[in-house]
Image (cartoon, rainbow, N blue to C red):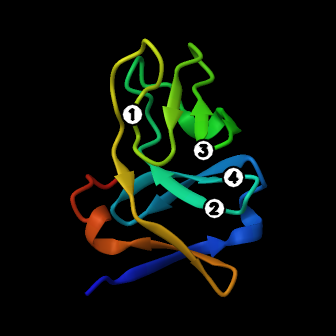
Amino acid sequence: MSVWIDIGALEDVPLRGARMIKTPMGCVAVFRTSENEVFALDNACPHKAGPLAEGIVHGKSVTCPLHNWVISLETGEAQGADEGRVATYQARVENERILLDRAFLRARVAA
C-alpha cells in the first residue's frame, strides 16, 4: 500500500512549469503540463546535471536549460540522439493537492 506525501497545492506549480520541492528524503523536480498532468523527476539532467526544474516544459517533456537535452516527463529518458535517463517518481493530484509516493522517495539521499 502506498503512503502519499502532500507536497503542496497544484496551483503552486504553473501550467507548463516546474518547481523544485525539498522533501525530508531529498529534492525532486515536480512538473505540470498544459493538460494539468503532474510528473516528478530527479532535478539533475543526465548530461551535465542541469537543473531540470528551470527547464522549458512542452507536451510531456522538459528541455534542460543548460544544453537543450529533451527529457521525457513520463519515463525520464533523454529523447532524440541524446542518451541517459533520470529517475521518475509516482505523483498524483488529489483535491487540488500534489502527492508523491513516499516509497519512491525513501531511496533518495536527503538534501
Q: Amino acid at mark 2?
A: Glu
Could you say whether the residue bearing mark 4 is in a helix, strand or loop?
A: loop
Q: Is residue 59 above or below residue 71?
A: below
Q: Amino acid at mark 4?
A: Thr
Q: Amino acid at mark 1?
A: Glu
Quadrant of the drawing holding the N terminus? bottom left
User: Mark 4 and 3 residues: CB-CB less than 8 Å, in contact?
Assistant: yes
Residue that appears at 74% across and 64% down = 12
Could you say whether the residue bearing mark 3 is in a helix, strand or loop?
A: loop
- First of labels 4, 3 by sequence position: 4
Q: Is residue 107 above or below residue 72?
A: below
Query: Which residue position holds label 4?
Result: 33
Q: Amino acid at mark 3?
A: Lys
Q: Quadrant of residue 55?
A: top right
The reply, left or right, for residue 96 in relation to residue 79 is right
User: Mark 2 and 4 residues: CB-CB less than 8 Å, in contact?
Assistant: yes
Q: CA distance from mark 2 to mark 4?
A: 5 Å
Residue that appears at 38% across and 58% down = 89
Residue that appears at 35% across and 19% down = 83
Q: Using the image, tell me which numbered label, if any, was put on residue 77.
A: 1
Residue that appears at 63% across and 61% down = 37
User: Mark 2 and 3 residues: CB-CB less than 8 Å, in contact?
Assistant: yes
The percent coordinates of residue 66 (x first, y second) are 58, 17
The reply, left or right, for residue 36 in relation to residue 78 is right
Q: Quadrant of residue 86?
A: top left
Query: Which residue position holds label 3?
Result: 60
- First of labels 3, 1 by sequence position: 3
Q: Is residue 44 above or below residue 30?
A: above
Query: Which residue position holds label 2?
Result: 37
The reply, left or right, for residue 50 in relation to residue 106 is right
- First of labels 1, 4 by sequence position: 4
Q: CA distance from mark 2 to mark 3?
A: 9 Å
